[in-house]
Structure formats: C-alpha cells, structure tokens
Amino acid sequence: MIRRNFRLLAGCMALAYAPFGHAQPAGALGDDFVYRIRPADTLIDLASRYTGDGANWVTLQKLNRVEDPQKLAIGLALHIPFSLIPVVPAPLTAIHVSGSTQMDGKPLRAGMSVPEGATIITESDGFATLDFADGTRLSLPNNSTARVDRTQKFKNAGLIDSVVSVQNGEVDSEVAPTGQGVGRFEIRTPVTIVGVRGTRFRLQATGTGAQSEVLHGKVDMSAGAGGSAPPVAVAGGQGAAVDVHGQIQVHTLPPAPIVTPPQRGASGQWVARVTPVPGAVAYLVRISRDPKGLEVFTSERFEGEEVRLVARRPGTHYASIRALNAAGLGGYDTVLSFEGASPLMSGSGHPVLLSDGAIVTLNNY
C-alpha cells in the first residue's frame, strides 16, 4: 500500500480582512510562523515579542525581503522561523473522559495532564477531550489512536505550538476559540493541518486515505513530501476525501438536518425523526454534555430516519445529529437538548449511590 503525507494548510478567509486592531497570528507555513502586519507594527517590536530579541529584526528583514523596515505593508504575511522563537512546555489536560480510554497503556482520567509524547487510545466505548493552553479543544471519538508529538507554547506571546498525530480514527477540533490565533497547530495522519483562529474542522484517518470536514474557516490541501500539485482550496461548508495516491476530491457538506423535537420513549430513550437530507446515506448521532459536541459520551449511526437519543446519566445532555453522504463526509450538526436518566432518590432527598460513587438511575416510560 502506498502511503504519502499530505498537507492541509488552514487559513481563515476572515483573517485577511479582519480588523487590524486585533492581533494577527496566522498559524504556520512549513518551518515558519506567519504573522500578518497591522498598523503600528515594527520589525523590532515583532522580533522582541516573538523571538525575545529585538536585534533579530535584521534577520526578519532579510528573510522577508523588506526594503524599508519603517514602512511595513499592512496585511503583509511576515515569516518568522520557528528556530528563532523560544518555547516552554505546555502540557494538555484531559477535561473529559468517558468509557475505556488509555494513555500509554494506563487508564486516562479527567483532570490528568497529557505530556508530550503520550499516546491516547479510545476503545469502542471510549471518548476523550483534550484542552490546550489557549483554549483549543480536541475531541477524540471512539476507536481512535492519537499521539501528542509536540505541546509547547511561545514563551513571550503565549501562542500554542502543538502537533498531534492521528494513527487511526477521528478528531474534532475547535482551534483558538477566543480569536487570538495560534503559533502552530497541526494534526498529522496522511494529512497535515495548520490551524488558525476560529477554525472548526474534523478529520478522519482511514486505511485508504483521509477525510476532512471544514465547518468554519478555510483550508488549502496539497500533497506533501515531494508533491508538486497546486493546493486545493477547501472552504467552510466543504469536505475533502484524499486517497493514498494523493488524489483529492472536494464535496459540499450536507446541511444540518431538520429534526423533530425528541419524544420520550421506552426504557428512558428519546426518539426523534429526521427529514431526509438529499444525498444522505445515514445519520450520525453523538451524545455529549456540551452543546458544541466536543465532550462526547456515545456515538451511533442510523440508516433510517428515526434516531434514538440515550443518556444513562442524569442531567441535561445534547444530541448532535449530522447527515453522512456517500463519500462518508459528515455535514453540519443539528443540536437537540434532552434530559438523561432520572436518579433514584433516597428518603432524605439525595440520589442513591453505588459503591463506586455512580448514581443509581431509573428508566422512565
């Protein structure tokens, strides 16, 4: 089997037109960090901020072929070599773990630190969500294996410098949600993704290639490791399937399905019906504890128009329902909230607990 590396260069269209009063970290390109110049920026200030040494302005001037360091073009993509940027460790934190999930062969628990070099495996019932130093979140659904190759942050600017390799399975990520941008954020499998602020994308690694779904932002996908083909633009609302030969096919993602309000069914389940989405071959339902669908408990595929929502824990849960097309790409989610299983209450008004601290629940009819 032929395996190649591919590169997904993620860039947000809004970035080029964003108000220049905001910081302009634009992610990474190869071995360089990219910063878009805004009014009042100077090479000395940027060299001090990112490299810790204002004298490096001379290197930046030569590298970027800046004729007059006093007149930087607004919007210029300034390249700063990562080799000049000092970094400090920035371990990840597992903020959500469900089911059978391991880190380096030992059970992973919520609240644990995930160091550089760690490998996380989620089994058929396992799910995990990792929190980065800048608020970026990476969700690993079941049957996934990922290794944290790099987890650092810029010493002076605080931007993350992270690389995660997905050996198999899927990831769902929300990058720099507060809009501050990133230094470098890559997910590597047969593809490499350089993320920027505000980008939400999913990636599935398979034995025959990879698939990516871009919900917000924009990516440019191109063959790496010697590939000469020009990049293929994949905008928000599009997905791309890449085979082992480097062939890229871009598809429009399915729209969010129209779903009826969930109704309580037997054995504590909720039932909802999906209005058929043109081109959909199935519907994926993921139950999470957050409306963004990043802290997942269960994942189930339905080929009919009736979908079931089940949460064995008490409290409010969220069902993210998306259509899957023939290429296996998932579209936008419709999110429904519903109540999980009801706790069994004692005479004193407190939930009844098992010996391991789990809450005893009732099935509602």
Image: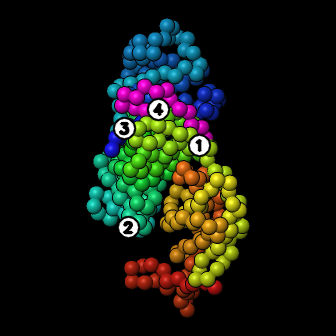
Q: Nearer the viewer, mark 1 or mark 4?
A: 1
The secondary element bearing badge 2 is classed as loop
User: Which amino acid, by three-letter code, is at mark 2?
Assistant: Ser
Q: CA distance from mark 3 to mark 4?
A: 11 Å
Magenta stretch: dominant SS? Answer: loop
Say which label, 2 or 4, has the lower sequence index.
Answer: 2
Residue at 61% from the left image edge and 83% from the top image edge: 266
Magenta region: which residues? 223-236
Question: Residue 256's spot in the image, x, y percent?
Answer: 66, 54
Say which label, 3 or 4, has the lower sequence index.
Answer: 3
Whether residue 32 can be seen here: yes
Packing grade of label 3 (10 A; few <14, some 14-19, many >=20) is some
Residue at 35% from the left image edge and 47% from the top image edge: 148
Q: Is residue 64 above or below residue 325?
A: above
The residue to which callout 2 is attached is 100
Side of 219 where 205 appears, left or right:
left
* Residue 289 magenta-highlighted: no
Q: Where, quadrant-wise, is the C terminus in this rendering?
A: bottom right
Q: Looking at the image, which is closer to me, 171 or 67?
A: 171
The residue to which callout 1 is attached is 251
Packing grade of label 1 (10 A; few <14, some 14-19, many >=20) is some
The secondary element bearing badge 3 is classed as loop
User: Which amino acid, by three-letter code, is at mark 3?
Assistant: Arg
User: Which amino acid, by three-letter code, is at mark 1?
Assistant: His
The residue to which callout 3 is attached is 4
The residue to which callout 4 is attached is 222
CB atoms of marks 2 and 4 within 8 Å: no
User: Which amino acid, by three-letter code, is at mark 4?
Assistant: Ser
Q: Is residue 56 above or below residue 132?
A: above
